[in-house]
Amino acid sequence: MNTNETLTLLEDRNFLDKIYQFSYHRCNTSVEAEDLCSDIILAVISAIRRQEHIDNFYAFVWTIAHRVYADHCRKQNAERQVYGVEDSTLGSGSKENEIDALIEEAYERKQVDRIFEEIAFLSRIYREVMVLFYIDEVRVKDIARRLGISETTVKQRLFSARNSIRKEVETMSERKYVLKPVRLIFTGTGDPCGNDPRTKAERMFSQNLIYLCKDKPRSAKELSEELCIPMPYIEEELDIQCRGENGRYGMLRKLENGKYAVNIHLVDYDEYDQANKIYEKHISECCQVIKDVLRRNEKKILSFPYLSSQTDLRFIMWTLNLSISWNMGARINEVIAEKYFADVTPVERDFSCVAVAYTDEQVPDMEFYGCDGTDAVSVSGYRHVFVSNIYGRRLDKHFHCGHNLARDQKLLMVLRAIGGLCVDELSETDKEIAAKALECGYLRKNGNILEPKIIVIEQKNKMDFYDLVHDFADEIGTVIEETAAELSAFMRSHIPAHLMNEYQIYAELIASTRLRAKMIEAYISEGLLSEPENRIGAEGVLMVVEK
């Protein structure tokens, strides 16, 4: 495929729109998205010149798009560290030079010019749609008439870009493997930044190698013969899986006899299902207790000194539910440690993970809800800011652990909106950022004032907030005792001897993984929890600030 053929495919407005969608929903402003989209186009043209043959052009483009976005993030971070400010005009001259270096023929230059004109048009349309809908509160049909586009296009710009692009990228990045069809689903707890061995086990080859060491230790030679892969490749992968990300904690460990054994709790789906049912049999009983606790504490919960107005108990419960499940799990772990595993010293590390194995023939029920948090110091006039978000079946993740809060313009806008922020005081760029913060549920508009929609509290009140439902665990003493006894017996019979000191991790990440999801569905059914309108919203997002 030559450059001219590539440019012809890139000129397709629908495909170019998808590339811009990819960029826009990863950037804070349309200006930044326009630059990223242009960089992707330049990278695609440059890559085409180095390829003799391309089987799937669209998959090729998405691979490059993800690489360019990763480079964009690293470059942005480096520029902020050096300059302390962002100057969107710095790269304009260098981009022209890049085009000149890539394009020699006049007709190709015309094609490229048309592509960049289309990108500039998309940039303007996306920006105006967001601001008109979220800030000016113009109806969809009026936006369509004003901008000369269809209502469907307006709705796509507003709501469908994130989901559609994710589905397309996932479809294009599917791979076929010839190894055993065993797949691993990972989850973890603690601080994953720099300590997460899952980052080294994303490939199917890695997962099958790890799984083969599950039931009995194996040598490199045995693994080579089992997988029909030459020894040098096996030995290299074994070294990677033993070192993990931080060099100390990996998926595998090398034994004194030279063989390799799993270094994490790795269970088949049937075992995972049995362990979770130990908790799940008590869900209806726990639900009734929660009803009573909320009924008694409703006034206290609603009158808590929030920094964002909160009047819906069912919405607040998305965040308090974490406290409930963590408290219950902690109590059960305490009983297990005191009564059944007093002879075992629990392992201590920054981060721990587990994995559940399943085959293509199985349809695993792996519903779970996680919670990722991030913090920053000396940001927007606050000494310390912490933000966490819940994600799972009904909610998509806003951000992950280690997310750079100080560079997240939407979260910075939330900080500015504490106490109220007048729309008239915002610049055009700020309005676009505010629109995106409204779209993802961080903010709400009260007349002409922006205010946080998520729960915002002061650091000094954090423990009091979690204690609003502390009496829940006190009222399910029988459930805690019964669950601890049954789970302890189950773990003694299923955990390998060399991992017995990680029994608490098994209890937290294997046996109770599905519990939170099941309880959430029960709460929604009973009217104790609000049902999210969108997968990206305010539910379960907590911000804690300290002046």
Image (cartoon, helix red, strand yellow):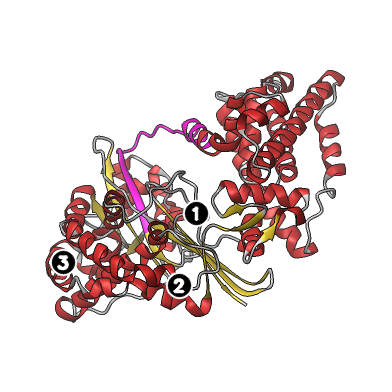
Amino acid type assigned to the residue bearing label 2 in the image:
Phe
Instruction: State the residue at coordinates (62%, 28%).
Output: 141
Determine if the magenta segment contains residue 346.
no
- Label 1 secondary element: loop
Observer-side mark, 1 or 2, equals: 2
Amino acid type assigned to the residue bearing label 1 in the image:
Ala
Does residue 501 sit above or below 453 in this rendering? below
Q: Which residue is mark 3?
A: 483
**Which of 216 and 146 lies nearest the eye of the viewer?**
146
User: Which is nearer the N-term, disc 1 or disc 3?
Assistant: 3
User: Which is nearer the N-term, disc 1 or disc 2?
Assistant: 2
Instruction: State the residue at coordinates (61%, 38%).
Output: 22
User: Dividing the image into 4 quarters, which one contains the C terminus?
Assistant: bottom right
Q: Which residue is mark 2?
A: 304
Amino acid type assigned to the residue bearing label 3 in the image:
Thr
Report, in whole angstroms, how far the alpha carbon at label 2 lies from the one at label 3.
33 Å
Report, in whole angstroms, how far the alpha carbon at label 1 lies from the one at label 3.
33 Å
Numbered range of the magenta stretch: 165-187
Give x and y (percent) for residue 209.
Answer: 34, 49
